[in-house]
Image (spheres, rainbow, N blue to C red):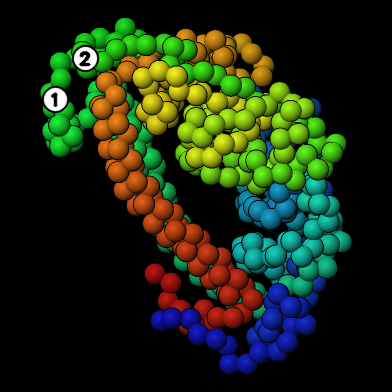
Amino acid sequence: MKPSAYASYKPSGVAWLGDVPEHWALRSLRYAATIQNGSDFKEHEVEEGGYPVLGSGGEFARISKFIYDQPSVLLGRKGTIDNPLYIEEPFWTVDTLFYTKIANDTHPKFFYWFCTSIPFGYFQYGSAVPSMTQNDLYAIKVPTPALEEQQTIANFLDAQTAKIDTLLAKKRQFIDKLKEKRSTLIARTVTRGLPPDAAQAAGLEPHPAMEDSGVEWLGQIPAHWQMKRLISQFKSVGGGTPSKANSEFWDGDIPWVSPKDMSSRIITDTEDHITLEAISESATKIVPQDATLVVVRSGILRHTIPVATNLVAMALNQDMKALIAIGEVTNKYLVYFIEGHNRSLLNAWTKSGCTVESIESSFMLNTLLPVPPGPEQQAIAAYLDRETARIDQLTAKVEAAISCLTEYRQALITAAVTGKIDVRARTVG
């Protein structure tokens, strides 16, 4: 049975709540729960066992005592304020996270589901670090049915969100498999060449003889390929950040690339634009189009080497390098090679023991690359363009489905806890 609306409603007087069921009470959050401050935990920390210490991102330590041992909803005080957490076991919270002592006439899980529907942006203060005060939270109006109805709503949302979460988990697992398939496809093709059918279609030898590359993590490569150092094939150009003291320097039409722009494999523009004057007064240079852009110094190097191609001339910040082709290796082939062997190259290019994560230029430039003949490079790049596009399109469809499901999940929660739908007659299976 599909949930329907209640028989009658009344104005809540709160824009984001709208009308609420006639028989529901409307009270300030202070009457639903008492908000408590977290505190420092260091003196009670233990290596094993104990109780969880919670921040806005979840558990991050264990301690020998707890601050509270009843069901509670945890609300962000500073930083991440829009991610309420629910906990039933004894716990401790840090001072950036409030915990709540929930009133006897408030069902803990109903209160949690309501808190996940609060538009915290209406109430936060502080632009640099979002924050909430106890008074801000206490002033929020909570539409409240009788305790039995609260439990019915909580049970309904527990069951329905569990179904949605199971489906979301399957779709996210599928995306992980697609990403793995994409990575494996690229790594295999730039190391072993085209599969037989694709090679034959491109007029290439479908079953080339293989030989050892001499690089342990590369393994075997086609015998007719050559191994050449990156420095013999590419010129390295560094970046620099112009002074921000003169705003006119940042009103030009030359794109300026930084690590935040490296979310795509192809870059045509950026949010920031600078002038030739700005470039002349900094270490950065104009990078011609079709260079290989690589992030060489950034916290994200823990996971990956962001790599992309620029389709227009641009400048780089100090965390970037541009590799400009000067030999037989094409820019597109290099991008695919770095993408396909990202983790191995990250290990090879990063100096061990450094506190600042960065790629060592000399390590990078002395990398041995497997170099196919020019026509084969072009065929490999064209093949990978086609095959990765298919995978990317499917990934985009799954991501869109995840977005729709996530929006539906939140809409369902909000509708239930604000009384837009009546779930009392709904059979939860």
Identify the amino acid type marked 2: His
Q: Is residue 308 visible?
A: no
Q: Residues within 10 Å of mark 2 (few under 14, many from 20)?
A: few
Q: Look at 30% across and 38% down and name the residue there.
A: 382
Q: Amino acid at mark 1?
A: Glu
Q: Position of residue 333 (x, y in %)?
A: 37, 28
Query: Any mark on residue 205, and which?
Result: 1
The span from disc 2 to disc 1 (Cα, nearest Å) is 11 Å
Q: Is residue 50 left or right of residue 394?
A: right
Which of the two residues, 87 or 84, is positioned nearer the viewer here? 84
Q: Secondary structure at mark 1?
A: loop
Does the residue at mark 2 contact the one at mark 1 (Cβ under 8 Å)? Answer: yes
User: Where 426 sits versus 273, above or below?
Assistant: below
Quadrant assignment for the C terminus: bottom left
Instruction: Name the residue carrying label 2.
Output: 224
Q: Residues within 10 Å of mark 1 (few under 14, many from 20)?
A: some
| Residue at 70%, 65% in the rendered image | 119
Is 36 placed above or below 47 here?
Answer: below
From the top left corner, tell me how far across and down residue 70 is, in percent. Answer: 68, 52
